[in-house]
Every structure is written in structure tokens, then in C-alpha cells.
Image (spheres, rainbow, N blue to C red):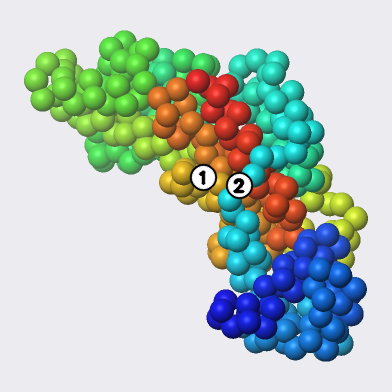
Amino acid sequence: MIARLDERRGVEPRRNVVDAYLETGQPVGSRTLSKLAALNLSPASIRNVMQDLEEFGLLASPHTSAGRLPTEQGLRLFVDGMMQVAEPSAEDRAQIEASLSDAGPIESALAQATSALSGLSACAGLVLVPKHERVLKQLAFVPLSANQSLVVLVAGDGAVENRVIDIPPGLNPSALVEAGNYISSMLAGLTLTEAMARVRHEIEAERIAIDRAAQDLVSRGLAIWSSDGADRPVLIVRGQANLLDESAVGDLDRVRQLLDELETKQDIAQLLDSAREGAATRIFIGSENKLFSLSGSSVIAAPYRGSDGRVVGVVGVIGPTRLNYARIVPMVDFTAQSLSRLIR
């Protein structure tokens, strides 16, 4: 396909259609492209090339008499072609570095970086906070009924969360008290993973000083919290108001859907979490991801690393598919590198 497009001088018109669309958000006609000196093609020749591009699924026409817009497939081809990430402009780089220069604790730095990205890109900024396990302070079991109990965990940072678990019918209430007392006295100060390992070791060594029913409650209560903490990445979002600019007036349904998706942070966080697997910036365009099948949004995301070189989080932006990818991709990549240097 690409060979044929090259033969018909299709690559350059496609790039110009994409550039013009990203700049204006409007369909681009052959007459507009013919005025570009670099093309050196007549309107008739450009129309023929654009027809070929439409047949290949790279361009689409919203109306019979309108110009063409790049499809999501066309945008993907364009984006993949410019993915040799360059440095952001000196001005963008300076603003990102300034946002991190006096940011204080890492949580504050992440929020500052997200706000800077949002302001520079005119999108919503996103950052996935490094996962960290809470330290256990106290855990209690409160009976709710004959077969259910409320598990109340108090973390070392003062956070309190609750979960409901099923318990065997007829369980002696003393087992609930015994399990809670054991966790609070013997496991306080440990992370949940450390507490689970300690309990397993004590049970295997037959050194745990509580009965079998209480042992089961301890293991189940800790398992709930341990898996919950691992499955709930923390997401910071800044600059949602940027999605409601003048260009959104004619596309309010899409923007409303996107804002709804941002409210459901768990889904967005899981999408960003998938960017951990890549070594560099990743781009999700429109319905390539089912999360954005309705809003037609794009996400540009890059992983950042901790002192040991392992990926600890992801930073990026979300906005309409009509993004200035050539500017924003280097910007996101540079922010991720800056956060990595800061954390180290």
C-alpha cells in the first residue's frame, strides 16, 4: 500500500491533510492543498491522490462536497512515522523543569508536572502515582450478621477503609476479636505483603498463637487488603477544563463522554498502567482502545522510573484525536525523563 502511495505522491498530501486538520479541526480540500508550494501538484492530481487515500481507509469525507479528514488509521500511520521522539522546544522544556524545581514531596511534584503538561498541551494532564503499600496499624473484624463481617483497616498514614467478607455460619465471635487483636499486636508496622509473609511463616512453623478459625480470618482479611492495594493504582488528573475550549462547542457529546470517562478514574488508570510495559512513549488513538470508542479521544503516555531503574508510574495527557502530536509527544517524553531524574 505505502509503495503505491509513494508512486502517486500520496505520502506528502496525506501529511499535509493531517497537519491542516490538526491545526484547524476542519476538513481539508484539494484546492487548499494545491496552494502549498512544496506539493507542486494540481488540484486535479491532488483529488486523485486523496481519492486513493480514502479508498485505503486513511482519509474520510464527512460530507459529499466537503474536504477530507484523516481517519484513526490515517492518524496512526502519521503518528508512527514521527515517533523518533525529538526534544521539546526550549520554552516547553523550561516550563516543565520549572514546575519540578521546587515541587517538594514526590506527590506534589507529580501534581505539578501534571498541571504543567495540561497547560502546555491544552489537554487534561494525567499521572499514575507510584504504587506503594500502606503500613498496617490496626485491623478489626466487626460482625454484621451470622455470615458476614466488616473488616476495618487503619493504615499507618491514618487512612481508614472498610471491606465486607463472608464468614462461616456459627463462627464464634471470639474468633473475630482474636484475629483482630493478633493482627494489631503482632503485625503492626509491616506492609500488607510483609504481614502476609509473616503469617504464612508462622502458620507453617506452627507458631501462631491463635486457633484455626482465627488463623483463617487473619489470612483472609490481609489477602483482601493486599490484592486491593495492588489493583488500585492512584491517578491524578489536572486541567479537565481545557477540554471545554472553543473547538469543543460543535462536539459537546464527545467532550461530555470524555469527561464522564475521566470521572471513572479506575478505567483510565488501567489504560495508563498498560503503558508501563513499554520502554518509551505510547499513543492510544480513538477506538483503538474500547474505552474511547464513544468519545474518540487520544492518550499520549510515557513511563517514568524509580531509583532502581524500574517503571514506577506513567505520565501523559488526554484530549481529542486532533492533537498536536509532533509537539506533545516530545513534551510527555521529556516530562517522564524529568520525573525519573527527580525520583532517583
- The picture places residue 175, in percent across and down from the top left corner, at 25, 24
Q: How many numbered tags mark residues here?
A: 2
Q: Secondary structure at mark 1?
A: loop
User: Amino acid under label 1?
Assistant: Ala
Task: From the image, tell me which residue sits under label 2.
Answer: 85
Task: From the image, tell me which residue sits under label 1.
Answer: 280
**Residue at the (42%, 29%) spot, across then down:** 309
- The picture places residue 172, in percent across and down from the top left corner, at 24, 28
Q: Is residue 114 left or right of residue 305?
A: right
Q: Residue 212 or 86: which is nearer the viewer?
A: 86
Q: Is residue 340 left or right of residue 9?
A: left
Q: Residue 252 or 126: which is nearer the viewer?
A: 126
Q: Is residue 116 left or right of residue 197?
A: right
Choose top left, top right, bottom left or bottom right for residue 336.
Answer: top right
Q: Residue 123 or 281: which is nearer the viewer?
A: 281
Q: Is residue 13 left or right of residue 203?
A: right
Q: Residue 58 or 189: which is nearer the viewer?
A: 58
Q: Residues within 10 Å of mark 1 (few under 14, many from 20)?
A: some
**Residue at the (82%, 65%) spot, across then down:** 20
Choose top left, top right, bottom left or bottom right for residue 188.
Answer: top left
Residue 99 drawn above or below residue 53: above
